[in-house]
Amino acid sequence: MNQLLSEEKVFKDPVHNYVHVQETIIWRLINTREFQRLRRIRQLGTSYLTFHGAEHSRFSHSLGVYEITRRIISQFERSGYKDWMPEESLLTLCAALLHDLGHGPFSHSIEEAFEMNHEDWTCRIILEDTEITAILKDVAEDFPQKVASVISKTYEHEIVVNLVSGPLDADRMDYLLRDAYYTGVNYGTIDIDRILRMLRPYHGRVVVKESGMHAIEDYLMSRYQMYWQVYFHPVTRSSEIILRQIFRRAKELFQNGYAFGFMIEPLKDLFRGEVTVEQYLLLDEAMIQTAFMQWTLEQDELLSDLCCRFIHRKLYKYVEIENLDSETIGEIRRSFAGAGLNAEYDLEIDFPTDLPYDVFRPGDAFDSKQILLLDRHDKLREISEVSDIVRSISGIHRGRYHLYFPQDKLHKALPLLPSSIAEIFEK
């Protein structure tokens, strides 16, 4: 069942200008409580503490991914490409719209703290007793399973998965454009119109017409720059570290029977590791920040201090180090403990890395992570075989060690640290 609305619905969007909704199912999915919850989840987690404009939501991003996917499918269908099956269109649109449904508050930070995966939660929300599930079953009884299989990358037709999750997917294209717009940087301003015109369905996967190679080079360079200038920004990493420490400390206290002055049921289930879908859907950033504000008043000094730092943006400072081995890390932690610092909470070591593109090597087989160019003779070539620019950035794992610490506490403890350790933090 793929009924069209009697009148097209349109969302005004600052990135794509308009988001067009024509299918009844898509409109109904957008209006579910599970999808509306994404308005209360920021797309960039704690990045708003670094880039004050980064207040956009998973809701707006999900609409953007849907719109890019809709444009790609519309182009495929208008051009009559025999490698695209129109019966896959609604499935692809639903998967694109719902792909981030399972993100929790502050997204990846809460995933790391509680060893969760947002894709697993997305599939549970799609498959269990929710408004989303009921609407998808109106298409077909097995339609929720099909949508979940696209998101989990197990769907039988790779081309559908490619559009939602691949090296050149609608998800990446939207978040580069949207995150660049809301953070105010220029790195993510890719030529999306050109890229979309150059995409082709070919032998079961999405490829790029060779004349579009330069637009793809620009896309990969933009991705590289966005990771280092926005996603891996050291101030954002500092806020993420404190956020994870808050969750870690609160979980420790809960498991040790600490009597919280403020606690609500969904957080208890989170700390127990027994969260149901119903409880998970109650978790949003408003709830978490309310808890943090209340925890600034807790008797536990460590939890109170961490929450004050996060709420009032009193973040950890950092120093950069080129090389750091396990022996030096152990020495630093022992020195911190000897100076009265908390070696587990007053020192965090971060080493961000990014692989902009997995370069193709002679003898390798093409895989789903690679971007393939289609030449005028209908031959496929992997982009790094053709592009000097892609080869130059491929395989780069750039990064330096960052040591994060509470400057006020460390300043008091500096005289008690060995001179060799103190020098590291006095840079």
Image (spheres, rainbow, N blue to C red):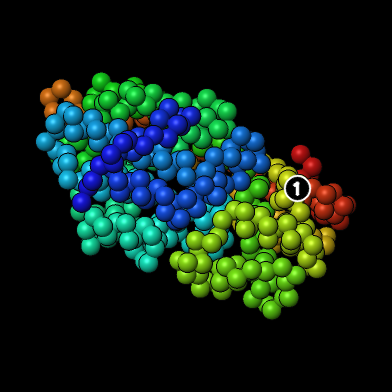
Q: Residue at x 62, y 50 (%)?
A: 240
Q: Is mark 1 on a helix, strand or loop?
A: loop
Looking at the rendering, which quadrant does residue 217 occupy?
top left
| Residue 337 visible in the current orientation | no
Q: Residue 140, how many percent across, how many down?
A: 22, 58
Amino acid type, label 1: His
* Foreground of the two, 322 or 297: 297
In the rendering, at what x and y percent does residue 312 appear?
Answer: 75, 47
Left or right relative to 96: residue 289: right
Of 377 and 18, nearer the camera is 18
| Residue at screen point 23% across, 62% down | 141
Q: Name the residue that disc number 1 marks.
A: 312
Q: In which quarter of the image is residue 138?
A: bottom left
> Is residue 10 found left or right of 379 in the rendered image?
right
**x, y percent for residue 109:** 56, 54
Visible residue check, residue 284: yes
Left or right: residue 11 compared with residue 85: right
Residue 234 x %, y % = 63, 41
In percent of the image, x 75 and y 70: which residue is there?
261
Q: 427 or 248, which lies in front?
A: 248
Please give the name of the residue rendered at 24% of the width and 33% of the height, measured from the top-left corner. 74
Q: Which of 331 and 219 is in front in this view?
A: 219
Location of the C terminus by quadrant is top right
Farthest bottom residue? 257
For label 1, the crowd category at 10 Å Cα-Cα, with few meaning under 14, some 14 to 19 and many 20 or more, is few
